[in-house]
Amino acid sequence: MDLKKELDAWYTKINRPEFVLTDPVQFPRRYMDAEDKRRQEHCRRDVEIAAFLTAVIAWGRRDNILRSAERLFARMGPSPAAFVMSGNRRELKDRCIHRTFFEADLQYFRRGFRTCYKKYGSLESLFSLALEPPGGTIWDGIALFRETMAEGNGGRCNKHIANPAAHSACKRINLALRWLVRKEGPVDLGLWKSVPPAALLIPLDLHVGRTARRLGLLERKANDRKAVEELTAKLRDFCPEDPVKYDFALFGMGTAGAV
């Protein structure tokens, strides 16, 4: 089997508009079509916040994720950015939003996002700043994001923001970054311009890891940071400028039982 040819075929098969209808990416995509140029920066923040929050709860059954995301954005009102920057608790209590993510966690993210925007202007600027020094990587961006979110919450970290220093795969943050950075539609958003797709890391979960191992793309047993680096390096051999495009292929092949 020509593995690159097979992966490219599955990428083309899965990366289609109809994929959005059953995928959590539909939630940040809702904020992409604002026509009012006076709200352009506000809308960019809507998309960034929606991408990170949707990715944070993107675990478990997909139908449950979609229902929980509807509940999450109903709590926030028509503009996630306005919700974050207002500083008003808006009747947040501690009701469950998705599995172990509660309204108290949403309040944590609210305070953290507000600090990110006050310090850096955008989440894109935060991550691009972390990439600037020689050797800067997405791991550095995730570490800076985690640190800034904690700063907005009195130095306290949150279990829903993975720690790359603890060897986590940081799957959900890498998923949000894939949505925001990849420019080749029609699924991903391509909102960010200063972070190149070549810098992205594969959003590694149980299913992607299992498929990658069956294809001989991943030897490491644990789904951790080293496994992310190993698999992303293999995928860069196929497409150096956009290795994470193959997340679609690994998902599709695994779902279809093609390996």
Image: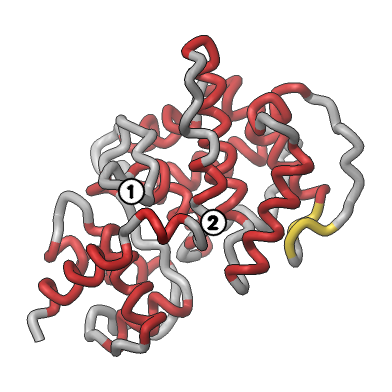
Q: Classify 54 as above or below 66.
A: above
Q: Which residue is drawn at 27% across and 58% down?
A: 245
Question: Mark 1 and mark 2: span between their CA atoms?
Answer: 14 Å
Percent across and percent down for residue 139 are 40, 50
Percent across and percent down for residue 164 are 48, 57
Q: Nearer the viewer, residue 249 or 181?
A: 249
Percent across and percent down for residue 224 are 44, 71
Q: Quadrant of residue 189?
A: top left
Q: Looking at this rendering, what residue extends furthest in the left direction? A: 2
Percent across and percent down for residue 162 are 57, 57
Q: Of circles 1 and 2, which is in front?
A: 1
Q: Quadrant of residue 16?
A: bottom left
**In the image: residue 6, left or right of residue 20:** left
Quadrant including the N terminus: bottom left
Residue position marked by numbered label 1 in the rendering: 186
Q: Residue at x 58, y 24 (%)?
A: 117
Q: Which of 128 and 95 is in front in this view?
A: 95
Label 2: how many residues lie within 10 Å, few (<14), some (14-19) or many (20+)? many
Q: Nearer the viewer, residue 24 or 199?
A: 24
Q: In which quarter of the image is residue 57?
A: bottom right
Q: Residue at x 28, y 42 (%)?
A: 183
Q: Residue at x 65, y 56 (%)?
A: 160
Quadrant including the C terminus: bottom left
Q: Classify 135 as above or below 257.
A: above
Residue flagged by tag 2: what amino acid is it? Pro
Residue position marked by numbered label 2 in the rendering: 24
Secondary structure of residue under mark 2: loop
Secondary structure of residue under mark 1: loop
Q: Which of marks 1 and 2 is nearer the N terminus?
A: 2
